[in-house]
Amino acid sequence: MKIGRYRRGFSIILVPPGGGRPRSFNFGRRQILLVVIAACLLLGLLIVSLTALGRMGRFSAAIARLKRENTKLMQEKQKLTLLEGELGRLREVEGKLATLLGTQKKNIDPKTGLSQAGMLNQGFVQQRIAFGSTPSLWPVPGEISQAFSAEPNGHKGIDIAVQRETPVKAAGGGMVDFAGEDEVFGNMIIVNHGSGISTLYGHNARLIVSRGESVRKGQTIAYSGNSGNSSAPHLHFEVSRNGRQVDQLSYLKEH
């Protein structure tokens, strides 16, 4: 193959190795210019495409971050809605108590800053909160297959034999401190009930609440199973006070 130049462009001459008839191809300057322009356009299109892909990747990451932030905001909004509802009910109760006692809100106790009805209402609210958050409800119906032991190396919870996929209820109201996988207890949930009290629910098949979520007493938080270090379907349940496991039966009073 030979490449030669003539006045209006370039020519390529192909000479067969066996001495056959050579063939030549002529390319004018206009054709070469068109090829160069087309190559530049393709290169520009490639650069634009790569730039657009990079921007789309950053845009997708920003959308994912906004979705996570939106989820957190929705959880906070849900908590705020619950608090507003509770505040409205407390105001209603205070109004009823004030009517029953024949007192007016202007009669304020100088020491507490509360009306007589408000003081009674505060005590009522504290008892209601304590009752709602105390883990007194049995999380699942069933027989105890292994009891609590206070010995140093004893069993620190109770095992309740249940069928797989039995709804697991929150023993009391509170905040989910942990919802995930544990090497021993498998799919596990820990609920913080306040005042140093927490409950643990282990060996679940699946969890339906997340960390940071508020739960009510009796709300379904998981479904029982056989995950983790377990030989048969059951629920491992613990009650801890100030970080130390205590006898669960001293709390469980409701079925």
Image: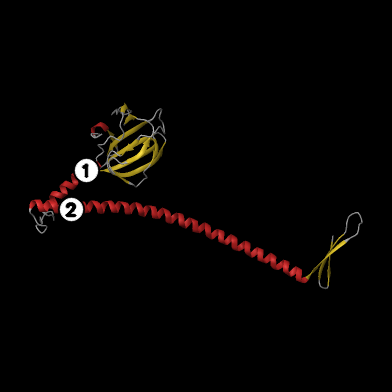
Under mark 1, the amino acid is Ala
Is residue 247 in sight in this rendering? Answer: no
**Viewer-side label of 2, 1:** 2
Compared to residue 130, the image places residue 89 above or below, namely below
Contact? badges 2 and 1 (CB < 8 Å): no
Residue 130's disc number: 1
Left or right for 25, reference 198: right
Question: What is the x, y in percent for residue 132?
Answer: 24, 42
Cα separation, mark 2 vs mark 1, equals 20 Å
Badge 1 marks a residue whose secondary structure is helix
Q: Please report whichever mark, 2 or 1, sits nearer to the chain's N-terminal start.
A: 2
Under mark 2, the amino acid is Glu
Left or right for 232, reference 46: left
Question: What is the x, y in percent for residue 122?
Answer: 16, 49
Quickly name the residue at label 2: 92
Q: In which quarter of the image is residue 66?
A: bottom left
